[in-house]
Image (cartoon, rainbow, N blue to C red):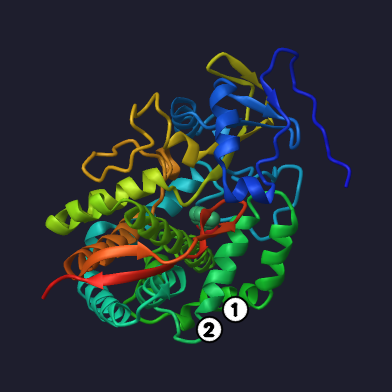
Amino acid sequence: MQKPFFDAPFPDASVSDIDPYETNHLEDPSEFHEVLRRSGPLVWLTHYGVWATGRHRELTAIFRNHRSFCSSRGVGLQDFKTEEPWRPPSLILEADPPEHEKMRKVLSSVLSANALSALRARFENEAEQLIDRLLGAGEFDGIAELAVGFPITVFPDAVGLTQENRNFLLDYGNLVFNMLGPRNEIAARAAARAEQAVPWIAKQCERQNLADGALGSDIYRCADRGEITEAEASLLVRSLLSAGLDTTVIAIGNMLRCFADHPEQWQILMQDPSRARFAFEEALRYASPVHTFYRTADEDVEVSGVRLNEGAKILLNIDCANRDTDRWPDANVFDITRRPGGQAAFGVGIHACVGRHLATLESEVLLQILAAKVRRIELTGEPVPDANNALRGFRELPMKLTARDP
Ligand code: OVV
């Protein structure tokens, strides 16, 4: 296969010919992170003709400058101005102010911590049953049984989806995130796997398929009030279904791995389960589920002394920035007692995750109940990484839980 090559836009640019989308780099990003760290604030990737940064300072500066660095040209490798997106763009993720603001207001209100508080008791109930079952299970796959097993019930219930075919949500989320990268083998496999999921998702977004009193119908009630149209409501439900499941599955899987590897941190949490929320935040920092989003320079702009031309794509490597020792001198230590404010796993600025309260509620509840019932989380085999063009997590996590003394 002939490799494309893009010359740097100016002669003294920092350049690298590493391909971060090769399977080995997706499975283990340490070499790519090393390139990002030693190449200065921004490095030109000759393989794709894009800029990249993994530094916390530049990443947050670019996320915060949504005027120069737009989202409406896509937040993946593809530029929507020159290439047709694979689906109608998201009204919130792939939009700029002022259009973005209206949609953001709707989802913020539907997904506010206050609006979600009624879900806690149901989540707790589900987590208790699941963990009791797994405590009697011996060795099991922590991804299938726990990282998928918990959210695959509570999330679609919260949105108000049918019981049938919920696994299509995983196929669809997997496709959406993989399509943020190049059209490689991984994206092709994701597309083949999601063939049935794509029309199924469109159907679940229709009003008549969403249970009353759940989050999906809450979005439609904003249409009733004239805040958005019904067509917009449908696409906002699609956003929920695109971003709401795979992300939390991977976050929970990564968090389980963190605690299996750091039993002393598990001890700290067991002694004080009220730390669960901070522990989740620290796990997000240490093992960030979304590794990459892009922005597009919508005008000529300078970042840390590097000139970017209008139309330049910038790869923002979140998991690298969250391990930046300029930001946290001990960034490579998993420490649930730190206050990881400023961690970028939910993004930064006007596009920061609007579903974070729901993700946090799910993870916090699961972690609190685990902490109350489980003395030890241990791996019983090698974790199997899952190569994804935008997500970093595991496909399998062989593990075992040991009960606390009654
Ligand atoms: C992959 C992703 C993240 C966040 C939002 C959406 C998708 C969306 O479809 O709005």
Pick whichever of labels 2 and 1 is earlier in the sequence.
2
For the residues marked 2 and 1, what is the alpha-carbon distance in whole angstroms? 9 Å
Q: Are marks 2 and 1 in contact (CB under 8 Å)?
A: yes
Q: Is mark 1 within 8 Å of ligand 1?
A: no
Q: Residues within 10 Å of mark 2 (few under 14, many from 20)?
A: few
Occupied quadrant, residue 271: bottom left
At a point 67% along the width and 51% down the height, the residue shown is 23
Amino acid type assigned to the residue bearing label 1 in the image = Trp
- Which residue in the rendered view is the most extreme toward the right? 2
Residue 39 percent coordinates (x, y): 60, 22
Q: Residues within 10 Å of mark 1 (few under 14, many from 20)?
A: some
Residue 390 percent coordinates (x, y): 57, 51
Q: Which residue is more in the foreground, 55 or 272? A: 272
At a point 55% along the width and 35% down the height, the residue shown is 33
Occupied quadrant, residue 44: top right
At a point 19% along the width and 55% down the height, the residue shown is 267
Q: Which secondary structure lies at badge 2?
A: loop
Foreground disc of the pair 2, 1 = 2
Task: Indicate which disc residue 165 carries.
Answer: 2
Q: Which residue is mark 1?
A: 200
Residue 355 percent coordinates (x, y): 38, 57
Residue 287 as seen in the image, left or right of residue 8 = left
> From the viewer's perspective, is residue 68 above or below residue 170?
above
Residue 84 percent coordinates (x, y): 74, 52
